[in-house]
Amino acid sequence: MKKLGLLFLFFTSLLSAQENFTVSGSITDASNGETLFGASVFLEGTTIGAITNEYGFYSITAPSGDYNLIISYVGFLDVKKEITLNQNQKVNFEIQEYATQLEEVILTADEKEHVNIRKPEMSVNKLNIKTVKRMPVVLGEVDIIKSLQMLPGVTNNGEGSGGFNVRGGAADQNLVLLDEAIIYNTSHMLGFFSVFNADAIKDIKLHKGGIPAKFGGRTSSVLDVRQKDGNNKRFAASGGIGLISSRLALEGPMFNKKGSFLVAGRTSYANLFLAITNNKNRVGFYDLNLKTHYNFNENNKLFLSGYFGRDTFKLGTSFETTYGNASANLRWNHIFNERLFSNLSLIYSRYDYDIGIKIAEFNWISAIDNYNAKYDLKYYFNDKFKLDFGASAIYYDFNPGAIEPTSTESSVNAMQLDKKKALETGVYINAEHKLTDKLTAQYGLRYSYFNRLGGQALNNYANNQPVAYNSVLGIYERGEVIGETNYDKGESIANYGNLEPRVSMAYELNDNSSVKLGYSRAAQYIHLLSNTSSVTPLDVWTPSGKYVKPQLSDQFALGYFRNFKDEAYSLELETYYKTTDNRIDYIDGSDLIGNNTIEQEILNSEARAYGLEILFRKNTGKFTGWVAYTLAKSEQRTDDANAGGLGISNGEWYKTPYDRLHDLSITGSYKASDKWTFSSNFALQSGRPVTYPNGQYQYEGLSIASYSNRNSDRLPLYHRLDISATYTPNKKPNRRWKGEWVFGIYNVYNKKNAASISFGQNSETGVNEATRTAIFGMVPSATYNFKF
């Protein structure tokens, strides 16, 4: 009887499934053909709906019947279409922007808010590119990274520093993707600008926690940036002319409107001003974004995109360095049927730098190359259950450094540090499951496997300790080498495998509020070696291996989300707790440059970060903006019992360089008239942790400083106010050429925020002195933007 009952249930469910049909298709912008990521598609009067994926695809399955299909997307007119669902069908939509809001600032940090309430995504921020373009920035150059730093949980290491930090994590713990290609250095001009040209960018999404299972390789966050596909309706151009840099983007249809192209470039001309003032120093950058695609048919699209960027920095005739990123991605979208969507990507990415020391007549070269293949699929079972699954493989080629003499008279010999190879693979499955009308869950599992490959000899150390503690002197020293092991090319030096579960849940309290909770585990197998507080172009990446373990992170998060007054206002509250094992720490006086045995300079540590994030936004009206506040701690502990020592700071918890107890950001925009819009930012945060001397002693006539525990002090409180005004001379909607002037002042009240405080002895008086270094005071800017 039990078997007959199960058989009856099976045929009953099968019969019920036969009465369901699927409507699928794509959502695009009617003005340029760009696919829209995050558009809401639902059946009016029901809870049945979907969100378009990264390529604008949606799929909805519902019982047969007559429905009104509603399309909704921030800044666009809602679309309603009557459909009869009596068979599977494909319906594509082109939707229009609000005619009265084509030039209006729209602020949003996620998808449309009624979707955000129900969707089980946690710790996610999405920035509208229009918002980014209106925010005041230094030197007038639109900057996506600095815009993200106005959101809760995101900070940096001060003005003029590269990278960004998320929830107390280091910059190398962020996975930064541009059209799925990994970007290893996000900075231009030593951190003043980011590598992202806003004219070429369509979508920006930051995962601070609850990272979907399809992403792997980093423990703090994922910044997923997508380039425009290119206008397949007509030729268009946009750009801007600023005080020290300019940009131009061209796009248009190709292949008889079956495809499109995008070419966008930027360059700086600060060197012209330096030359005029007879300054022999040089600093500059350029970058180029490329993309094209071809629609074979409704079910097959091919994309090819690329990015190339380069920086040059020169100090007189003695020192010169160039560095930059390059990436390419060949991508194939294939729709198997109305429920199964797939994307296959073949990706190349490279970061390298070249240092020229003219006095010593040699160049120092370092690079990291990776080759990535990934295949992602999404199956839309029904309205209550959607499944993502896929696999990826990344082959790494690390060149930590090579010295090349530039003349026969050079006193430096050619040298090549050991190149390192590694293979990282991963498979994942992730489900979005509507358990009840009020409870939705997203849960998944990722398995990652990392294999450090041979091709060189590695040292063996006494007691297997690359670093040993000298109890007499109270310092760490290099371990005793007792031999070496040769590994053949392709032979495994070390391998690691990790299961990475991810889960998040959203419970809808009512139509306007919900609570969410999440847990995620992530593994990171490559590490950035840097004993400075911020990212520099000269940092070196290294893989996990025999002596360097992968980082493992666990994060728990709980949040409350609420909309007010028909979504005119919104509130997001999140608290989190994150731990990280095997975080790299450095012995005092560590030497990382040109070191072939880097394991003798580092220790394994553990880290923890926890905090509360508040984001309150005003989403509509002439005045829009947000207030973001973060109360957080970020700590690290290195208790190195294996090396026989006490660790760093006697094995106690100490503040990481990314600890910011208080972080307040206020962003606002006021549309005064059709011609004038005013914007402002205010930032206030606790100073960066630093180590100050706490005493001194005399040795052979010299005054020697002694230091307190690591990062036990702080730089002074950081704060600044930025303002900008946008003037649009002619607001005729039918005019092809549209231009605007953007005037800005960065750091209005000229606050000289300390980037660092150094201590030294005055050679004349013999007195110890503190020197405060500030990067920026007040910086005015003017930019003319245009499009046609």
Image: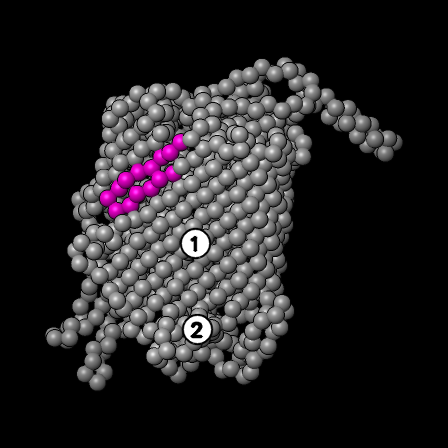
The vertical placement of 210 against 771, above or below, is: above
The quadrant the C terminus occupies is top left
Q: Position of residue 398 (x, y in %)?
A: 50, 64
Q: Position of residue 669 (x, y in %)?
A: 29, 31
Would you say residue 668 is visible in this rendering?
A: no
Taking the spot 29% from the left edge, 23% from the top edge, the residue there is 731
Q: Which residue is mark 2?
A: 595
Amino acid beneath label 1: Asn
Q: Which residues are magenta?
A: 236-249
The vertical placement of 479 against 296, above or below, is: below
Color encoding of the figure: one colour
The answer to which of 437 and 302 lies nearer the viewer is 302
Say which element carries label 2.
loop
The answer to which of 533 and 631 lies nearer the viewer is 533
The answer to which of 376 and 764 lies nearer the viewer is 376
> Does the magenta segment cover residue 347?
no
Taking the spot 49% from the left edge, 76% from the top edge, the residue there is 466
Q: Are marks 1 and 2 in contact (CB under 8 Å)?
A: no
In the drawing, does residue 422 fall left or right of residue 766? right
Amino acid beneath label 2: Asn
Q: Position of residue 327 (x, y in %)?
A: 48, 51
> Does the magenta segment cover residue 239?
yes
Q: Residue furthest front?
A: 256
Q: Residue furthest left?
A: 765
Distance from the alpha carbon under mark 1 to that under mark 2 = 24 Å
The answer to which of 690 and 276 lies nearer the viewer is 276
How crowded pointer 2 is (Cα within 10 Å; few <14, some 14-19, many 20+) is rated as some
Q: Which residue is mark 1?
A: 325
The quadrant the N terminus occupies is top right
Taking the spot 48% from the left edge, 46% from the top edge, the residue there is 306
